[in-house]
Image (cartoon, rainbow, N blue to C red):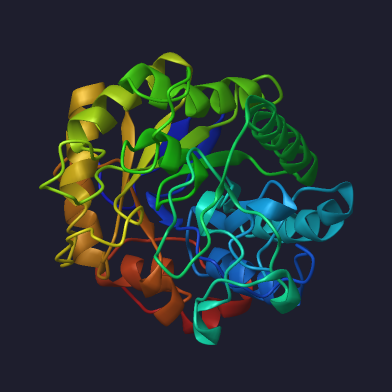
Amino acid sequence: MNGLFSPLKIKSVELKNRIAVSPMCQYSSVDGFANDWHLVHLGSRAVGGAALVFTEATAVSPEGRITPDDLGIWKDEHIPFLKRIVDFIHQQQAVAGIQLAHAGRKASKSAPWLGNKHLSPEERGWEEVYAPSPVPLATDVPPPVELTLAGIEKVISDFKVAAQRALTCGFKVVEIHAAHGYLLHEFLSPLTNQRTDNYGGSFENRIRLLLEVVQAVKTVWPANLPFVVRVSATDWVSDADDAWTLPQSVELARHLKALGVDLIDCSSGGNVPVQQITPGPGYQTPFAQAIRDGANMLTAAVGLISSAQQADHIIRTGQADMVFIAREFLRDPYFGLTAATELRQQVTWPVQYERAKPRI
């Protein structure tokens, strides 16, 4: 029976355990550039025993940033420092992954500690934000601009070129962010997609952009490297007939598997303010199991997974194939090593830290 510290091979990449550092926005970039903060933040988690370390949501275009302080990969100049980070992660026997993202109508905001408010161009924001339909995020926020067909083509191209740059950086795993109310999720959900063309209305039309992004990225992403998509499994709007739901996510996963996607990163919510969520330990894990069983493909559980025993239980009981951990890695950058000790698993420590390795 597989446990948290059993290896997992996805195509040509073998992960030493089932623990990944989930993408976590740091809002610490200038003009999209990675810097020493990102090197230390991501590098220390690789030192700390994670098998897979993802960057935060990395914008494929300037207008696709959540905030002016987001990490980016929309120009070649971003490559050298990202490559430095990737090289360090790989030196720690971990695997570097990148999450490619476009914020859609949730773009042009301030960092959370600066109020998470909409920014005007005079406040370092930008003139227009884009979405499938001109549905405002809130009553005090200007409505987004509806993407034209030319704009949709640009989005697809931006993801493709960003993936090519990611490959040049040396990343071995790519994840497309289609969750949390950002652009691709906005197209999936009828709550935010009111289009009447080929990208709106029916389920097949609403998933079209995500499928086209995946297909475009796959033209440059090697077939032997893992491909991941993050979804919000539900909008958490139970009283709406036109919300995105778990059964739709299962069906979407089947389509993505047919295109060669290897793993679904199963999150939820983030699309509309009226969502009704009651968070608790592992509250999103049932989504990972439902998609795993319904689409017969690898999934990752994410959300309030905070202990070694909890994470191990998720893997051993077949609820998911990996755990993507966020906040616990902020509290403990060495969660992977800590979990191994708690579960009495022999793992390799960095030689520089070997003197502190507990006896098991």
Residue drawn at x 28%, y 32% is: 249
Residue 281 as seen in the image, left or right of residue 355: left
Residue drawn at x 10%, y 47% is: 239
**Residue 138 shows in the view:** yes
Nearer to us in this view, 94 or 292 = 292
Q: In this view, does 37 lie above or below 187?
A: below
Q: Position of residue 223 (x, y in %)?
A: 61, 20
Residue drawn at x 61%, y 64% is: 108
Residue 183 as seen in the image, left or right of residue 244: right
**Residue 350 shows in the view:** no
Furthest residue toward left: 239
Residue 310 as seen in the image, left or right of residue 136: left
Q: In this view, does 112 lie above or below 46?
A: below
Residue drawn at x 70%, y 27% is: 150
Q: Is residue 185 above or below residue 62?
A: above
Q: Is residue 35 above or below residue 85?
A: below
Nearer to us in this view, 123 or 10 = 123
Q: Position of residue 47 (x, y in %)?
A: 57, 68
Furthest residue toward top: 258
Residue 32 as seen in the image, left or right of residue 120: right
Furthest residue toward right: 77
